Amino acid sequence: DTGVSQDPRHKITKRGQNVTFRCDPISEHNRLYWYRQTLGQGPEFLTYFQNEAQLEKSRLLSDRFSAERPKGSFSTLEIQRTEQGDSAMYLCASSLGGWNQPQHFGDGTRLSIL
Amino acid sequence: AQTVTQSQPEMSVQEAETVTLSCTYDTSESDYYLFWYKQPPSRQMILVIRQEAYKQQNATENRFSVNFQKAAKSFSLKISDSQLGDAAMYFCAYEDRTSGSRLTFGEGTQLTVNP
């Protein structure tokens, strides 16, 4: 169990640029979640996958955001045409199937928009 | 919609003392889980303890225990014999079958442990 891995740890970009984050879940976990956390707040749910299927998306996930999990293993979260309000910590978590399985979090990717 | 409220933005405790962090939630569901997560500075979120709503017995994990009051929709975390390593942001979180496995988090409580 190597834990949930996220890359990069930090991303600084100019407004209007596209960014992509990667998450590698714990190997036997078939569920993968993305959350966004702004400074001083709790994480907010963005989306989750069961294997390669994206089963739910939050209203927070505007059309500039897209997430994929092509082979049911790692996942990517892309933000197009970044805005100042996108500055946040993006957290990935994974769990075994089932609604009552605990979620294991990665270290997060901190995005800063200049 | 389910909501989770943590009314204490900051708490402090002396090393070796006991501290209680508060959490209230709102739901119309009867079957759900409640969690406490710990987030040290610049480090990953770690699950501290969880409670299933159907279980009347309060969960305990070593120095961590909860006081689950289902009727009052209250879920507090007690940390006994506080240690310097307990200093972190603590988040209360909720999950039920209708929420599609997503966690709903409170605003967090920043815990400081004084030597």
Image (cartoon, rainbow, N blue to C red):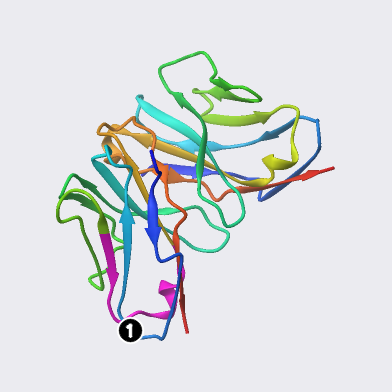
User: SS for tag 1?
Assistant: loop
Task: Give the letter of the chain under mark 1.
Answer: A
Q: Is residue B47 left or right of residue A7?
A: right
Of residue A99 and residue A32, the one placed in the foreground of this image is A32
Residue at left offset 58%, top offset 48%: B108
Q: Which residue is mark 1?
A: A17
Q: Looking at this rendering, what residue extends furthest in the front direction? A: A2
Q: Is residue B85 left or right of residue B102?
A: right
Residue at left offset 39%, top offset 34%: A102
Q: Magenta stretch?
A: A76-89
From the viewer's perspective, is residue A41 above or below residue B73? below
In percent of width and height, residue A58 lies at 29, 56
Residue at left offset 18%, top offset 48%: A72
- Mark 1, Cα crowd under 10 Å, few <14 / some 14-19 / many 20+, is few
In percent of width and height, residue A14 lies at 41, 86
In percent of width and height, residue B33 lies at 41, 29
Instruction: Specify the amino acid type for callout 1.
Output: Gln
Q: Is residue B51 left or right of residue A18?
A: right
Q: Quadrant of residue A64?
A: bottom left
A3 part of magenta stretch: no
Q: Is residue B98 left or right of residue B87?
A: left
Count of residue discs = 1
A84 part of magenta stretch: yes
Residue at left offset 23%, top offset 40%: A30
For the N terminus of chain A, which image quadrant?
top left
In percent of width and height, residue B73 lies at 51, 29
From the viewer's perspective, is residue B112 above or below residue A76? above
